[in-house]
């Protein structure tokens, strides 16, 4: 039976076994090398509180640190949450198909997305 992917959907190359991790969304056990890993960058405080802090701060060039959360997803949750997409055989094999930029559905980009309007 032919294999669908050259690496069989994993990046374990030469290792017999890898540790398991839990999906951030559904808590499913996933092999660490198969899980889809993404960093979620957020502000520590919301915009209105950030403005209050900026007004009350003695330093005018103080930047609040950001939260960097490593999100680990199983394949099902990553597809459902649009973190990765299903690609056809030609795109999977080509080098330009490997680079994936997540689309912006928030409506803040070029004005083509849903939402964000009045």
Image (cartoon, rainbow, N blue to C red):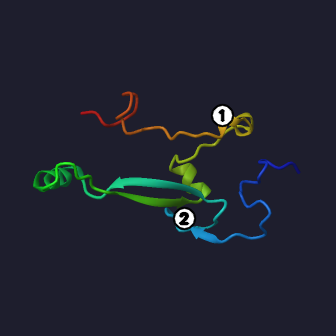
Residue 90 x, y percent position in the rendering: 74, 34
Q: Mark 2 points at which residue?
A: 23
Residue 28 x, y percent position in the rendering: 58, 67
Left or right of 1: which side holds 36? Answer: left
- Element under label 1? helix
Measure the C-alpha gap from mark 2 to mark 1. Answer: 28 Å
Q: Mark 1 points at which residue?
A: 96
Q: Check the image and report above or below for 75 versus 103.
A: below
Residue 86 x, y percent position in the rendering: 63, 43
Identified at 16% across, 55% down, the residue is: 53
Q: Check the image and report above or below for 109 versus 32.
A: above
Residue 105 falls in which quadrant of the image? Answer: top left
Packing grade of label 2 (10 A; few <14, some 14-19, many >=20) is many
- Element under label 2? loop
Identified at 77% across, 52% down, the residue is: 7
Q: Residue furthest right?
A: 1
Residue 32 x, y percent position in the rendering: 63, 65
Left or right of 59: which side holds 23? Answer: right
Residue 74 falls in which quadrant of the image? Answer: bottom right
Precedes in sequence: disc 2 or disc 1: 2
Q: Check the image and report above or below for 22 versus 114.
A: below
Mark closer to the observer (2, 1) = 1
Packing grade of label 1 (10 A; few <14, some 14-19, many >=20) is few
Identified at 72% across, 35% down, the residue is: 94
Q: Nearer the viewer, residue 64 or 10?
A: 64
Q: Nearer the viewer, residue 74 or 32?
A: 32
């Amino acid at each position: 039976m032919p294999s669908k992917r050259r690496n069989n959907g994993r990046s374990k190359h030469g290792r017999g076994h890898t540790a398991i991790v839990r999906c951030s969304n559904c808590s499913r056990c996933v092999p660490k090398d198969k899980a889809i890993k993404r960093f979620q960058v957020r502000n520590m405080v919301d915009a209105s509180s950030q403005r209050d802090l900026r007004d009350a701060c003695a330093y005018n060039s103080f930047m609040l640190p950001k939260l960097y959360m490593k999100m680990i997803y199983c394949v099902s949750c990553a597809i459902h949450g649009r973190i990765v997409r299903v690609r056809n055989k030609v795109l999977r094999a080509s080098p330009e198909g490997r680079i994936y930029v997540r689309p912006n559905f928030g409506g803040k980009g070029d004005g083509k997305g849903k939402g964000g309007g009045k």
